[in-house]
Structures are given as structure tokens and as C-alpha cells.
């Protein structure tokens, strides 16, 4: 799914990252947010889950498409789960405020959209 040209800089995505008992928060305003496990010889993903060795190097990505956010599994080894439902690799799913993304054995991300808006109907 290409980045929509109607993406407006300044849109904000806040993500709570939980890896086991560790919690951190990150904010993004880029059109694409990568999720994965960093490696010394590769670009570091925006959300680097290096502490969870069950996360693929290029596991998933969140991207703005117009006014909505979508999540796509990048053919990860152990899969990506959205609110308990396994994603089909390469098939985008719309996100809404409060959605929970599980990747690997230990990592859970909670998505918060600016203003708590809904991301729209399913694709």
C-alpha cells in the first residue's frame, strides 16, 4: 500500500511499547513507522524491539493512508496480531485508537491516534 499523497505532516501517532515488564512510549509524525528488531548492518526500525528475539528484523509497519492508519505484517516469521486476530502477511488492516498489536513472544504495542479518532472502515 503506497503512502497516500494526501498525508499531512504534523499528524501524530503515539505508541506505547511493552516488552515483557518494560514500558516506553514513542511519538511519530512520519508517514511510515517501521516495527522490527535492529541489526548492526541494517537500518534501525522506528520501533526497535531488539530485546525480543522472536521479532523479525522487518516485522511490520504502520502507515498513513489519507486520514487513516493501517498496519501490515511484512511476512514476519512469527506473525503480527491485531486485537488478538492474526494478520495475513501483506494484507493491510485499518487501525483505531486503543488497538493492541502483538509481535513476537514478548512485545505488545498500543496505538493512540491524535484526538482519539477512529482510523476508518476496514479496507
Image (spheres, rainbow, N blue to C red):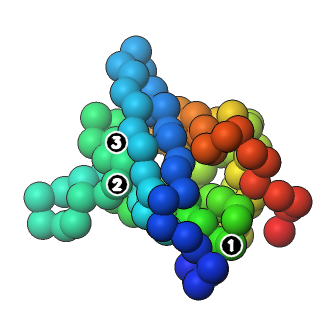
Q: Residues within 10 Å of mark 1 (few under 14, many from 20)?
A: some
Left or right of 45: which side holds 78? right
Residue furthest top in the image: 21
Instruction: Locate residue 110: give its quadrant.
Output: top right
Which label lies toward us, 2 or 3?
2
Residue 18 location, quadrant: top left
For residue 46, the mark is 2
> Where 123 sits versus 46, above or below?
below
In the rendered image, the vertical position of residue 27 relative to residue 1, given as above or below: above
On the image, numbered disc 3 is attached to which residue? 49
- Looking at this view, is 59 or 122 the one in front? 122
Distance between the Cα atoms at labels 1 and 2? 21 Å
- The Cα atoms of the two marked residues, 2 and 3, are separated by 9 Å
For residue 114, side relative to residue 29 (left or right): right
Q: Indicate the position of residue 2 as horizontal and vertical percent values.
A: 58, 83
Quadrant in which the C terminus is drawn: bottom right
Read off the residue under disc 1: 66
For the residue pair 117 and 35, the one nearer the viewer reads as 117
Asked if the residue at tag 2 contacts the one at tag 1, i.e. Cβ–Cβ closer than 8 Å, the answer is no
Residue at position x 61%, y 44% in the image:
114
The residue at the far left in this view is 40
SS class, disc 2: loop
Quarter of the figure that contains the N terminus = bottom right
Q: Residue at x 24, y 58 (%)?
A: 44
Res. 31 visible in picture: yes
Q: Secondary structure at mark 3?
A: loop
Across and down, in percent, residue 64 comes to 60, 66
Left or right: residue 51 versus residue 94 is left
Point out which mark residue 55 bears: none
Q: Residue 13 in the image: x percent, y percent?
A: 53, 48
Amino acid at each position: 500500500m503506497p503512502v497516500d499523497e494526501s498525508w499531512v505532516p504534523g499528524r501524530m501517532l503515539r505508541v506505547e511499547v511493552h516488552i515483557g515488564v518494560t514500558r516506553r512510549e514513542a511519538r511519530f509524525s512520519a508517514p511510515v513507522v517501521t516495527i522490527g528488531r535492529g541489526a548492526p548492518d541494517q537500518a534501525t526500525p522506528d520501533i526497535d524491539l531488539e530485546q525480543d528475539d522472536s521479532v523479525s528484523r522487518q516485522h511490520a509497519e504502520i502507515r498513513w493512508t489519507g486520514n487513516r492508519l493501517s498496519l501490515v505484517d511484512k511476512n514476519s516469521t512469527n506473525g503480527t496480531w491485531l486485537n488478538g486476530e492474526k494478520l495475513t502477511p501483506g494484507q493491510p488492516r485499518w487501525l483505531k485508537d486503543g488497538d493492541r498489536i502483538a509481535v513476537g513472544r514478548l512485545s505488545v504495542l498500543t496505538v493512540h491516534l491524535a484526538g482519539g479518532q477512529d482510523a476508518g472502515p476496514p479496507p
